[in-house]
Image (cartoon, helix red, strand yellow):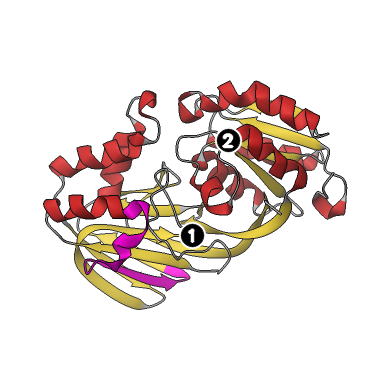
Amino acid sequence: MSAGQNGAPMRRVALLVNPSAGGGRALRALPKVQGRLGALGLEVRVERTRDLEHAGTLAREAVGRGETPVTLSGDGLIGAVAGALRYVPDAVLGVLPGGRGNDFARVTGIPLDPEAACEVIATGVPSAVDVGEVDGRTFIGIASLGFDSDANRIANAAPARLGQLVYLYGALRALAAWRPAAFEVEVDGERRAFSGWSVAAANSKAYGGGMFLAPDARLDDGALDVVLSRRTGKVEFLRTLPRVFKGTHVRSASVEVLRGAEVRIAADRPFTVYADGDPIAELPVVVRAVPGALKVLLPA
């Protein structure tokens, strides 16, 4: 049995399940996950979340009862629970992948199979990770806007049967109606103004189910990697898109990556900022890195 909060045996788990995550993937995985956690010696109590706010409340209540909150969901719920727990002393979060993207698990080495990932809940090490903050709201992965705003909106409305392809589907659908936008970005006082596709502030490497938008971003460096995608033709964009899955797109002359703790972003037309797959704010915004804000059980 691994050590949990304050070095005590970690035996009590509050499993927070998003019933709609991954088109029902989390709910389908629940019986095997419960069985595996029990076999590992953990006492499990299951809570089904109604929405992101409800999930945060359940997580805080779990810590108050001496339980370790564990999400079985997608990245959006992880970000919401991270926001709820970052101010709670001694809180440790466990993560089981149950969504479509599962990029937090992918980046941190948590197995993408939720049953296999149960081992991390039993034997993982509480590790401090950074979070991002957009106008006071917390995210764990990447906050982006511009073309990404349109692509995320379309992806979120797409049929669940598309699975991870939903993000590629959203991008291709958004491409047809896209027109370049003018962005103003300030990173720790350094300003950029450009016409192009998108701006992203990355606390982590990946989004969209394995798209390594910011391949050098780290969850423990106290900074955000800010990815600026400048104007190109749509044909060139299509040529570059597959390279995002390997992170090699950053070598393109149309992509610039900055790094800093605070990012101010504005544009010449309204955009919704999406983070961890969900809408989180409207432009203009201030995005900040919050170093070591949360402890998460990660592979030893």
Measured as percent of width and height from the top left, residue 141 is found at 48, 52
Q: Residue at x 67, y 28 (%)?
A: 33
Circle 1: element type: loop
Front: mark 1 or 2: 2
Depth check: 289 or 165 in front? Answer: 165
Left or right, 168 with reference to 13 = left
Residue 57 seen in render: no
Task: Report the number of numbered marks.
Answer: 2
Question: Tag 1: residue type?
Answer: Asn
Magenta stretch contains residue 195: no
Q: Residue furthest bottom?
A: 190
Quadrant in which the C terminus appears = bottom right
Depth check: 228 or 107 in front? Answer: 107
Magenta residue span: 244-262
Residue holding disc 2: 113
Depth check: 190 or 268 in front? Answer: 190
Measured as percent of width and height from the top left, residue 252 is found at 25, 66
Magenta stretch contains residue 246: yes
Depth check: 133 or 241 in front? Answer: 241
- The Cα atoms of the two marked residues, 1 and 2, are separated by 24 Å
- Residue 247 versus residue 15 in the image, above or below: below
Q: Toward which corner of the image does residue 231 lie, by quadrant?
A: bottom left
Residue holding disc 1: 203
Residue 2 seen in render: yes
Question: Tag 2: residue type?
Answer: Asp
